Image: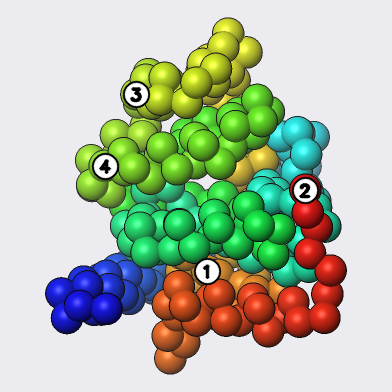
Amino acid sequence: MSDKNSEGKRSARERLQAEREREKARGKRKRALVVAGGIIAVLAIAAAVGIVVSNTKSGTSGTVTPPKGAVGKNSLAIPVGRNGAPSTLTVYEDFRCPACDAFEKSFRDTVHGLMDSGQLKGEYHLVRLIDGNTGGTGSLNAANAAACAQDAGKFREYHDVLYDNQPDEREDKFADKNYLLQLADKVPGLKTPAFTSCVHDGTYNGWVDKSNADFNSSGFSSTPTILLNGKSIFGENQPLTPDILKSDVAAANKGKPIPSS
């Protein structure tokens, strides 16, 4: 490997880690503001003459319909790869998240190769942390569109297109549903009337919100969160490279059958 290639890979890893740290800091600041605001609100209510408790619930849980083939607890994950693959890569991601994009750029070819060879299957959990941290609806709209692509059997292709065209997180370009439909033109056969309606109607918005709530209660605090067979393999003090991922998967699969198709 040339010194230039080594430096490029090292720089990519450093950018990825830096983006994760910035996102985590933003999340901590927002949570602190929410807590402070909640305390002030409680004190204000307690000081009032009386407290009125509504007999109706604030919002309804309703029925959340998952996209076709969704798996896992409450059907909150989109599967990619062969069902019989011996190892599972669980990915919590946000399509507006720069660190998620950096992870994609560094690991996509490796992950695709492991999945295509039957060594690994993926379970993708779509969340909307950036919407919550900086405002907007791009994370939600992009995740809904990706779920619509899952219905068409083209989740992975559209997933990759979204990252290839990820705007600056401050622009929130994914909030524009027409832009998401424009990107669908890059995936042959995806932009059907059914897909277009699904994107415009926000068919899976409730499912995305439920996935986001599940992530918020999971104990993880930033995206991307990457688990191999349920164990976190990427984060603070957890260096990960494509070669390490290949090695970890090979070790986990030792002695286990690999499906041929």
Please tell me whether mark 2 sits on a helix, a strand or a loop: loop
* Mark 4 → mark 2, Cα distance in angstroms: 36 Å
Residue to which mark 4 is pinned: 167
Circle 2 crowding by C-alpha within 10 Å: few under 14, some 14–19, many from 20: few
Give the label, 4 or 2, closer to the camera: 2
**Residue placed at 72% from the left, 81% from the top?**
252
Residue to which mark 3 is pinned: 179
Give the label, 1 or 2, closer to the camera: 2
Residue to which mark 2 is pinned: 261
Work out whether mark 1 precedes mark 3 in sequence or the reverse, and give the earlier one: 3
Whether residue 50 is visible, yes or no, is: no
Whether label 3 touches label 2, CB < 8 Å:
no
**Which percent across, then down, holds residue 38?**
48, 65
Whether label 1 touches label 2, CB < 8 Å:
no
Residue to which mark 1 is pinned: 225
Q: Does 81 sit left or right of 84 as displayed? A: left
Using the image, tell me which numbered label, if any, was put on residue 14.
Answer: none
Q: Which colour scheme is used?
A: rainbow
Whether label 1 touches label 3, CB < 8 Å:
no
The kind of residue tagged 4 is Pro
* Mark 3 → mark 4, Cα distance in angstroms: 11 Å
The kind of residue tagged 1 is Thr
Q: In which quarter of the image is residue 13?
A: bottom left
* Mark 4 → mark 1, Cα distance in angstroms: 21 Å
* Mark 1 → mark 3, Cα distance in angstroms: 27 Å
**Which percent across, then down, holds residue 218?**
65, 70
Whether residue 226 is visible, yes or no, is: yes
Circle 4 crowding by C-alpha within 10 Å: few under 14, some 14–19, many from 20: some
Q: Residue furthest left?
A: 4
